[in-house]
Amino acid sequence: MAMVFPTLEGKCAIITGGASGFGEGLAKGFAARGASVALADMNEAGAVTKAKEIEDTYGVKAIGIGANVSDEKSVKEMVEKAVAFMGSLDVFISCAGILTAGALDVLSKEQFERVTAVNYTGYFLCAKYASAVMKEERKTDETRMFDIIEINSKSGLAGSKMNFAYAGSKFGGIGLTQSFALELAPYGIKVNAICPGNLLDGPLWSDPERGLFKQYLDTGKVKGAKTIADVRAYYEGQVPLGRGCEIEDVVRAAEYIVLQKYETGQAVPVTGGQVMLS
């Protein structure tokens, strides 16, 4: 059994997009710190497999659930199933997201709306049903605190060339975060966003067919790039600390958000200095 660092011991967390990438890493990171976790994903088989790995490795309760965050019925059922399994809900991490890059005269309306449905509308639906549970649980203990965390992006802090659908959804996500924070503060629900830099070793970037390295090479987003290695070197060169974001960087940011008691409505950059708040 892996070593457990029980800073989040007893917490119950739902993580969407939990079958891979940041979502999987957050689920494992929270489990390593003692939390029970529900991994929700369109890839139900993958979520179930990862949940079993987490139970075997960390000795905490974990469940994999199939869910489509852009579908209201699916989100409602996902929250209900997760809470029935874990018995409670302390933290909801909205991590499911998609990215389709393309120039303004290339990207279709259907592609634009799909990105918006998952990244923006999906966050709204998740916050709606997670907060309903949290409000009910707050009634039994008025000192209890809860967290809704959106995994946003550095593209929610600064525009992204030929990536407007994604950047727009993430800018909108910060607007939702601030607005939800104001509405839910009386119920002890903190709402914050984390804005990671580029997870260059994750599937979003490195998938050989659909990853961003391939997309950006094909669309010519990086001027002069001839190979995927050229694209990677360009993005590493944009970071003052000289590397891509790593999953543990984001896990630590999420851990901080949950443990602190006096921050809400914030967008926390985890960018290696590439994007700084002004």
Image (cartoon, rainbow, N blue to C red):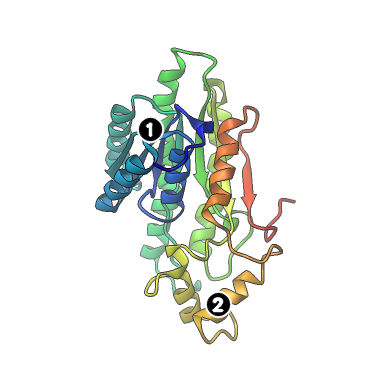
Depth check: 27 or 88 in front?
27
Q: Image quadrant of residue 114?
A: bottom left
Q: Which three-letter amino acid code belongs to the residue tagged 2? A: Val
Identify residue for label 1. 129
Q: Can you give x and y, in whole percent of width and height, for residue 204 in the image?
A: 44, 64
Q: Relative to the observer, which residue lies in front, 138 or 177?
A: 138
Query: Dot 2 surroundings within 10 Å: few (below 14), some, or many (20 or more)?
Result: many
Residue 157 placement (x, y as % from top left): 63, 54
Residue ID at (52%, 36%): 5
Which image quadrant: the N terminus?
top left
- Secondary structure of the residue carrying tag 1 is helix
Q: CA distance from mark 1 to mark 2?
A: 39 Å
- Name the kind of residue labelled 1 in the image: Tyr
Answer with mark 1 or mark 2, whichever residue precedes in sequence.
Answer: 1
Do the numbered discs 1 and 2 sit on residues whose CB atoms are within 8 Å?
no
Residue under label 2: 231
Q: Which residue is drawn at the image coordinates 48% and 74% (left, top)?
A: 213
249 w.r.t. 181: above or below: below
Label 1: few (<14), some (14–19) or many (≥20) C-alpha neighbours in 10 Å = some
Residue drawn at 43 percent across, 45 percent down: 28
Lateral position of residue 178 relative to residue 273, left or right: left
Q: Nearer the viewer, mark 1 or mark 2?
A: 2
**Residue 263 place in picture, x, y as percent:** 64, 33
For residue 90, which quarter of the picture? top left
What percent of the width, then of the height, locates residue 270?
Answer: 62, 52
